[in-house]
Image: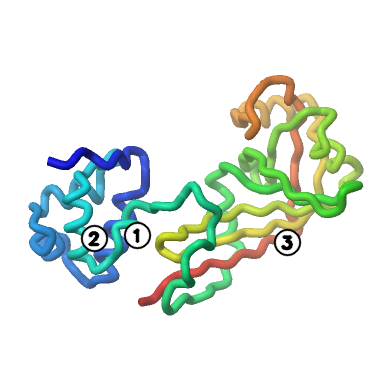
Amino acid sequence: MASGTGHGGTDLGRRIAEQRGRAGLSRAEAAQRAGMSAEYLSYLETSATPNPSRGALARLAAALGAPPAALTGAGLDQPPGQHEPAGQPVLQALSEAECRDYLGAGGVGRFLFVDARGPVALPVNYRMHGDDIVFRTGGDSSLAAAATGQRRVSFDVDHLDDALGEGWSVLVSGTASQVTDPAELDQVRALGIAPWAGGGGRETYIRVVPSQITGRRIRITG
């Protein structure tokens, strides 16, 4: 038997379910075409750590009419945009509520500001504090310098799925300032934000107060 492909902790299950939906197949129908039990396919779609053999993954991809890379997310170590544009893409404008839903999960975003170099975009780990975006940096960093005097900045969060040809992007425009009030500092420290670059000594918290939030999403319809 072929060895496992090691997809633990990935979104393999979501990819399988999406491709099965596009093929218009029930779980039982897809399993029969792939020569596996419906129970095993249910495991692949719902387990947080699915680990199919290469043979099972190849049979399932063939049954769904999709390349194996569409199921595994192959090529995630490459910059996005290496694939040809997907067929029948639909560009959707996101409502502010939808944008806030995407922002609410936290994670890695890009802080956009202008300094002596010109426009700069740097990745940071962030969390939401009410309606505001908060991240952590060093007191002598360019990010901290950009958050003095209520300066105008932007903040971008996105996700691109090259294998499926889908993605979304949210852009926040607003003002940035350093959190200095002791009570507020206690609140943002409780968010548990770890610096994206790791390490200690980054005890300056930056707050971005949104004045405008826009977003777009690309979905494939066929």
Question: 59 and 121: which one is in front?
Answer: 59
Q: Of the residues shown, which amino acid type is indicated by label 1?
A: Ala
Question: Percent from the top left, x then y, of residue 203?
Answer: 74, 25
Kindly report which numbered mark, 3 or 1, lies closer to the viewer in this rendering.
Answer: 1
Percent across and percent down for residue 113 are 81, 50
* CB under 8 Å between discs 3 and 1: no
Asked whether, in this view, residue 152 is left or right of residue 137, the answer is right
The answer to which image quadrant residue 181 occupies is: top right
Is the Cβ of the residue at disc 1 closer than 8 Å to that at disc 2? yes
Q: Is residue 149 above or below residue 63?
A: above
* Residue at 42% in and 77% down: 87
Give amino acid for label 3: Gln
Lower sequence index among marks 2 and 3: 2
Do tag 2 and tag 3 residues touch (Cβ < 8 Å)?
Answer: no
Task: Name the residue at 57% across, 72% down.
Answer: 93
Residue annotated with mark 3: 212
Give the crowd class for mark 1: few <14, some 14-19, many >=20 residues within 10 Å.
Answer: some
- Identify the residue under disc 2: 61
Residue at which label 1 appears = 70
Q: How many marks do you count on the picture?
A: 3
How far is disc 2 from disc 3 in space, using C-alphas? 42 Å
Residue at 73% across, 20% down: 201
* Among numbered discs 1 and 2, the one appearing first in the sequence: 2
Of residue 12 and residue 187, the one placed in the foreground of this image is 12
